[in-house]
Image (spheres, rainbow, N blue to C red):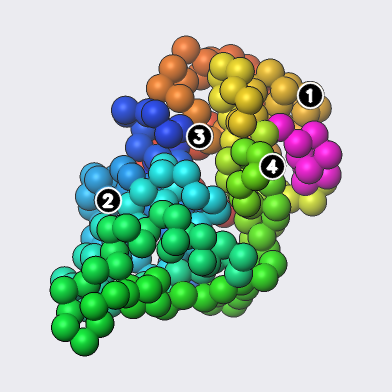
Amino acid sequence: MELLFLGTGCAFCKDLFNNNLLVFLKNTNLMIDFGTKATRALDVYGMKMKEIDNVIITHFHADHIGGLEEMALMTKYFLKKRINLYLREDMVDALWEHSLKGGLQYTGVLDVPHADLGFYFNVIPVKDKFILDGVEFNLIPTYHVKGMKSFGLCFNNILFTGDTQFDKDLLHHSLDKYCTIFHDCDFTKNPVHTYYEDLLTVPKEKRHKIYLMHYSDIYKKFEKQVKNDGFKMACQQKIIKV
């Protein structure tokens, strides 16, 4: 299995794109989130929209769903392709009604004057797990913003936290369960993300398992410290083999 971070940045990054991860499986792929900068990041890497087969959305912030409208229009009208859109079953209606409907409901197609999400995507509701190309993906609830549903994913002995506040119990339990952890990180205090200083509660002998992601453009000031502390940093546009 190979992993490609199209970007590793937070919502306001100018250089790092959005923290969106593309998972290459044996016969297909899965895009975890598709933010406002994702189409540009794809182009920089040298991939085309038509090469994406499956997408899953972890929560509704623009740096994670902002590229879906372009994806919907491009695949429907130009590529004539329906991407599989995996969504937790209690998020399907909300994604359409509160985020995508305004720009996508009017189709210009005479026999379909008003579209729904299924007009553009092959929508696959998920309860707590799904299997894709023989790999089981489990949805792990996280606490990001009060009132907003959000989750991470575990698969192939990997935990991808998605956006999350610091959850000591989840992290320390995961250190014994997973070989690789991609964890939300902010180098300044942020009430809805994990502060780097909190990650220092991880025993140093286990920090090599953790890749930091979703950091801001000031990350270069901290690269040496991160290395000395025993963590790794996910790098945009570089393949990670697991």
Q: Position of residue 33 (x, y in %)?
A: 46, 53
In the image as oriented, which residue stretches furthest toward the front? 113
The amino acid type of the residue labelled 2 equals: Thr
Q: Residue at x 67, y 63 (%)?
A: 138
Of callouts 4 and 2, the N-terminal one: 2
Q: Which residues are magenta?
A: 166-175
Residue that label 4 marks: 143
The amino acid type of the residue labelled 1 equals: Thr
Vertical order, 23 against 135 (above or below): above
Say left or right for 126 vs 118: right
- Comparing labels 4 and 2, the label whose residue is closer to the camera: 4
Of callouts 3 and 4, the N-terminal one: 4
Of callouts 3 and 1, the N-terminal one: 1
Residue that label 2 marks: 39
- Comparing labels 3 and 4, the label whose residue is closer to the camera: 4
Spatial separation of the CA atoms under disc 4 and disc 1: 19 Å
Vertical order, 210 against 138 (above or below): above
Q: Tell me the SS state at disc 1.
A: loop
Q: Nearer the viewer, residue 165 or 107?
A: 107
Q: Residue at x 39, y 29 (%)?
A: 12
Q: Tally the marks.
A: 4
Residue that label 1 marks: 201
Q: Position of residue 186 (x, y in %)?
A: 56, 25
Q: Tell me the SS state at disc 3.
A: loop
Q: Nearer the viewer, residue 213 or 68?
A: 68
Q: Tell me the SS state at disc 2.
A: helix
Say left or right for 105 vs 2: left
Q: Position of residue 132 (x, y in %)?
A: 55, 74
Q: Residue at x 70, y 55 (%)?
A: 140
Q: Position of residue 123 (x, y in %)?
A: 46, 75
